[in-house]
Image (spheres, coloured by chain):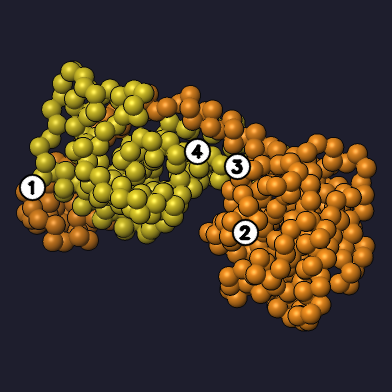
Chain colours: A yellow, B orange
Amino acid sequence: MTATHDVIVAELPGLLPRLWRYGLVLARDPVTAEDLVQATCVRALERSSQFMMGTRLDRWLFSILRSIWLNQLRAQRIRTGHGVVDAEEVLVTDGAHEIEMNIFAAQVFRQVLALPEAQRETVLLVYVEGFTYQEAAGVLGVPVGTVMSRLAAARLKLSALQAPTAADDREAL
Amino acid sequence: MAAGSTDIGRDALLVAYLDDELDPQAHEQVEQLLQSDPAARAHLAALAEGGRPFRPAFDALLDAAPRERMEAALSAALLKAARRKPDRYRRALIATAAALMLLVGGGTAGYFIAKAPNLFEQEDEVEEAWIDAVAGQLALYDASSVANIKVDAAEQKAELDRLGEAVKLDLSEKNVSLEGLTLKRAELLHFQGRDVAQLLYASDKHGPVALCIMSQPGGEEEGEVESRDGLNYTYWSSGGRRFLLIGAAPEQSIDALGDTVRDRFGA
């Protein structure tokens, strides 16, 4: 096996939860998010020789996941009538367990999920994943200026909403 | 919201200012703008108000991820990848086998792959070696080299009859014609002592496509489209035969063509 393959095999398990979270933000559905992660693993292993040593594996994997979402699963969901999901009604449960978050975190999460897809994934990459604008632009395949305007639009939308208030109560989303 | 979003460029700069993503010069320009322009200050306030503690809120999701199931799926993908990537030594042997396949025989009489005793003992390795050999062979063709093959209808029919007899399938024209493809060559090949009917097509839009049928049971029943050496392929087994459809066509085309062939020859 090649060195790049070994790096991917060693690091991929630790990145699965973050990939799933990105998938959840894109698809707004935990089952689809899981499918996305699975497809991402298969494709990353198939294309391991294309990963450039010395670059960040998480960004490469995020790009793959995003490409699978755009080219396969999103179209499939739209075809089968599952393309439109109301963020307020996103059931973050796969039947086996529900995601528990405190009310404050759940409110933030819901507000972000209600943003248009391009805005919410940009918010995730920059404000949650901590990518620089340049790094996020690389994953998204857009100019840095587009990242900036998406973040501005997202923030203006959120500023129109009531800011969540801190609370210790927990709820299931 | 304290301000509208009429000036997208200015808001983009302001958000970059808030996120500390500006170079010193642009940072200074924004500071000057904020001092002189109340509307800009109002926008900045609105943008700041739209901030949230995103990271702690979203970190809760990491614990909720179905980690075990994803790790299990990853393990399955790793096993599959390992099965599809023989070690270096074996790859070298497979490449040699593929080269031999082209050297021996020649002409339209058919290629013959040299026997390599004890090389591929296990069933799935037969599959792997076969796919590698065919991919290696097909990679040598481009669209024009196949398009230029002259076809004699009577000879082609006779060859199809002979192939059909060898793999015990009705390979008449109606069964082997595929949408968007022109059958250019039909020949009986041999791989590790097994008969292989190979139909080579020229594509209207892409490079060549090959349909190969080996008269030997075993292998997966339902094949998904995978890729190797820049070619997409689907491989499956049914009715005591193995089928391989491979070409430079996009994944969806290979998938659709595979469905057509499966329907014709029974899944």
Q: Distance of mark 4 from mark 3, alpha carbons?
A: 11 Å
Tags 4 and 3 both on a single chain:
yes
Task: Give the foreground label among 4 and 3.
Answer: 4
Vertical placement of residue A42 versus B249, above or below: above
Amino acid bearing label 1: Met
Judging by the rendered image, the residue that carries numbered circle 2 is B264
Quick one: label 1 or label 2, which is nearer the N terminus?
Answer: 1
* Discs 3 and 2 lie in a common subunit: no
Q: Where is residue B69 in the image (x, y as percent from the top left)?
A: 48, 27
Amino acid on which the number 2 mark rests in the picture? Arg
Q: Do labels 1 and 2 share a chain?
A: yes
Most foreground residue, B187 or A29: B187
Chain of the residue displaying label 3: A
C-alpha span from label 1 to label 2: 63 Å
The residue carrying pointer 1 sits among few (fewer than 14), some (14 to 19) or many (20 or more) residues within 10 Å by Cα, namely some
Amino acid tagged 3: Leu
Q: Name the residue under label 1.
A: B1
Say whether residue B249 is left or right of residue B131: left
Residue at the spot 87% in from the left edge and 63% down from the top edge: B111
